[in-house]
Amino acid sequence: MKVSKPKYIMDHPLSPINRLPPECLSFVFKCLRETEHVCDPPEPATLSSPRLTFCALVQKRWRALVKALWPHLKTPPDELLFFAAFEGHSTLMSFAKKQGATHFGEVIAAAANQKHIGCMKLAKKWFDKSPHDEYIVFGLALISAALSGNIRELKLVKKWGGKTFDTALYNAVQRGHIEVMIILKQWGAVEFDTALYYAAKKGQIESMKLLKTWQAVAFDAAFEKASKCGQIEAMKLLKKWGAMPKRNG
């Protein structure tokens, strides 16, 4: 359900929740109902569900309402920081930082996943890196960018030190991101047999064909995984390549 934004919200000054006019609160509830699915199991659409509230409001980029509701929704500032980075809202990221957010490295991957390169750069600027943390943070961001096929963000994270090329390849093949696969191979990814397994799992035929040209040969393991996941076309292709299905008994 698409909800149009009341004009009053545009002009309403920052105020505590008990001073927000009824039409504003009614609108917030409508937004919450749109985002109930983000939690598993689903949470009720109430103002006692801070995760849903901030997901809805940050998603719509309503900074004034986020600030107005903030004192009444006991949400960790790092959670607000994550939502803001995921939705590409650098101003709300700054607000979360002022409220005490400190997990700047963790949100780089969230921003990379959604092509929010400005938020990536902002989080990196705040990131108090150490050699161990830097490897984990940029490695996860590289994987996240590969999963979404975001080449610009992928290259930026690699420049920052992301080196998890094989794990990123496993994620890229599952979404059929061919160009990302080629880039990761050029950077040093070599685990093509494992990548074939993941491609077969998702039935990504073009990914599988490319991996075979790179000398992937683990056809039996890939066939078994494809059969368990019901990927009929992948099974046919692997059988054509010489996969030997296991026989029960």
Image (cartoon, helix red, strand yellow):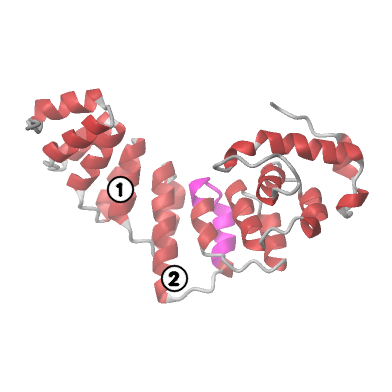
Residue 33 at least partly seen = yes
Q: Assign a secondary structure to mark 1.
A: helix
Residue drawn 40% across the image and 44% down it = 147
Residue drawn 55% across the image and 60% down it = 121
Q: Name the residue under label 1.
A: 169
* Closest to the observer, 243 or 183: 243
- In-image side of 210 versus 53 (left or right): left
- In-image side of 2 versus 201 (left or right): right
Task: Give x and y (percent) for residue 89.
Answer: 66, 51
Residue drawn 51% across the image and 61% down it = 106
In the displayed orientation, state which residue is furthest to the bottom: 130
Q: Assign a secondary structure to mark 2.
A: helix
Task: Give x and y (percent) for residue 79.
Answer: 62, 57
Classify residue 43 by image quadrant.
Answer: top right
Residue 160 at least partly seen = no
Pick the quarter of the image with the N terminus.
top right
Q: Give the range drawn in magenta.
A: 112-124
The amino acid sitting under disc 1 is Leu
Task: Give x and y (percent) for residue 78.
Answer: 62, 61
Exactly how many numbered labels are in the figure? 2
Pick the quarter of the image with the C terminus.
top left
Q: Name the residue under label 2.
A: 133
Q: Which of marks 1 and 2 is nearer the N terminus?
A: 2
In the displayed orientation, state which residue is furthest to the front: 249
**Above or below for 78 versus 12:** below
Task: Give x and y (percent) for residue 187.
Answer: 28, 55
Give the main secondary structure, helix, strand or loop, of the magenta stretch.
helix
- Determine crowd level at label 1: few under 14, some 14-19, many 20+ residues with C-alpha closer than 10 A: many
